[in-house]
Image (cartoon, rainbow, N blue to C red):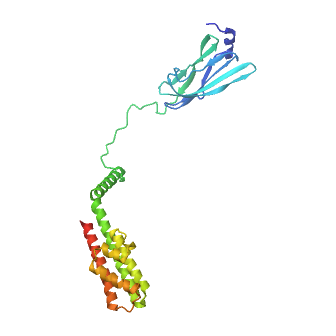
Amino acid sequence: MLLALPVLAQPDALPQGRFLRSGTRVGEIVEYELRLTHTPSLEVIFPDSAADFSPFEYLGQRYYPTRTRQGRSLDRTIYRLRTFSLDSVQQLRLPVTVLRGRDTLTLLSEPAVVRLQYTAPQDVPDQLPALRQTTTLAPVSPLFNYPYWLAGLAGLLLLSGGLVLAFRRALRRRYQRYKLRKNHAYFLAQYARHIERFELSRSTTNMERAITLWKNYLTLLENNNLNTLTTREIEAHYNHAPSVSTALRIVDQVIYGHMLTEDTQEINRAFELLRQFAEERYQLADYRGRS
């Protein structure tokens, strides 16, 4: 291959390689610098990870831009290497490829040397100290067994989930019955309070509130539209049950007929009939909830 040999023959035209420190340890990262000074017209290629770095291992490299001063160009690269060889002195030569048109030339750098620094003592005594047998158990502080606790917690969650899936119908039924009892107890307390206020004030407003409470309770209990029905429609809805018909007739006479002079016993009887009817409907709903 033809190349401008006078250019390459200059003392600074050969690659120069050196380790940035004189010693290294096994497995420790050491940096190696490779540089080449050449004429600006030349194109040079530095080795990459595919090159042979033995006895070192290639870890990475850092390129520097070409710098030209006074008609001379400098290319420079620093390689990060490590060695696992136990040789006390280790050397490295790297090739640089120079391109000029169709001509190529490979230049080897001068060997760079690094010394291996040993961490273990080099002098081993002829006789090792006698080993002493110790069979006494050493106290060890107990450690919290996280894997077993986490596994137990996961198993407990899975078991709980399985029980919920297996008994969800029974649990839902129990919850519905609990709501029924709670709503019924609230209705009885509020209904008794409205009746007491009516007896003290003899006001039709308190009677209307008691009847409205009764309708709203049965609407919620049986999931119907009872609170929007008239008296005749309510009687028809419950198939003209005697207790409902009698109680609502007395209530209508008091509210719409302004007959507060109606016998007190009759009014109390109307309130009681409506309460008993609500109790019967609650017992029926509770029985359906159990079945």
Quarter the C terminus occupies: bottom left
Residue 11 visible here:
yes
- The residue located at (64%, 11%) in the rendering is 101
For residue 158, above or below residue 61: below
The residue most toward the top is: 2
Q: Nearer the viewer, residue 146 or 213?
A: 213
Residue 275 visible here:
no
Q: Position of residue 189 (x, y in %)?
A: 36, 80
Q: How many marks?
A: 0
For residue 65, above or below residue 109: below
Q: Nearer the viewer, residue 177 or 88?
A: 177
Q: Position of residue 37 (x, y in %)?
A: 67, 19
The residue most toward the right is: 70
Q: Position of residue 205 (x, y in %)?
A: 44, 84
The residue most toward the left is: 291
Q: Residue 239's quadrant in the figure?
A: bottom left
For residue 7, above or below residue 62: above
Q: Nearer the viewer, residue 158 or 27?
A: 158
Q: Position of residue 46 (x, y in %)?
A: 60, 20
Quarter the N terminus occupies: top right
- Left or right for 151, reference 86: left
Q: Nearer the viewer, residue 86 or 259?
A: 259
Q: Residue 255's quadrant in the figure?
A: bottom left
Q: Residue 261's quadrant in the figure?
A: bottom left
- Left or right for 68, reference 181: right
For residue 7, above or below residue 267: above
